[in-house]
Amino acid sequence: MGIFREKEPQAIQVGENAFKCPVCGNHLFWTRRAQLNTPVATFFDLDWANKSATCYVCSRCTHISWFLNPQY
């Protein structure tokens, strides 16, 4: 999967807890960053100023979990 940072899915830790997929209970994820675009910033061509999120994509069911700051 060329759109992900890792070649193999990884176990994820969020804070002090091991993260598991809320849909299927899987513990392996691919990681990706995504920009959180807003209509106003897009209108003024300022998308670069928007925040970005860390996305964990379940390697089993492909459910995507979004986090603004997964290290809280």
Image: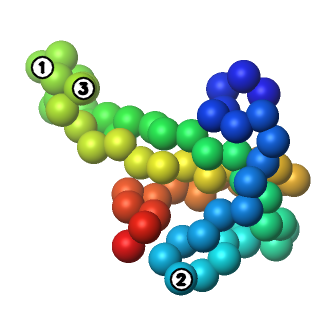
> For mark 2, what is the residue?
16
Is residue 12 positioned above or below 50 on the image? below
Residue holding disc 3:
47
Q: Is residue 44 left or right of residue 59?
A: left
Q: Does residue 33 appear anywhere in the picture?
A: yes
3 and 2 marks in contact (CB < 8 Å): no
Percent from the top left, x then y, of residue 24? Answer: 84, 68
Q: CA distance from mark 2 to mark 1?
A: 40 Å
What residue do we see at 18% from left, 32% from top? 49
The kind of residue on which mark 2 rests is Glu
Q: Residue 7: percent from the left, percent from the top? A: 78, 34
| Residue 49 in the image: above or below residue 54 | above
The type of residue carrying mark 1 is Phe
- Residue with the most extreme top position: 45
Q: Quadrant of residue 5?
A: top right
**Image quadrant for the N terminus?**
top right
Distance from the alpha carbon under mark 3 to that under mark 2: 32 Å
Colour scheme in use: rainbow
Dot 1 corresponds to which residue? Answer: 44
Tags 2 and 1 touching, CB below 8 Å: no
- Single out the mark in the foreground, 3 or 2: 2
Determine which quarter of the picture holds residue 32: top right
**Residue at disc 1, secondary structure:** loop
Q: In the image, what residue type sits under mark 3? A: Asp
Q: Label 3 crowding class (10 Å Cα cut-off): few <14, some 14-19, many 20+?
A: some
Mark 2 Cα shell of 10 Å, populated few (<14), some (14-19), many (≥20): few
Residue at 54% x, 71% y is 14
> Based on the displayed image, in which of its 4 quarters is residue 6 positioned?
top right
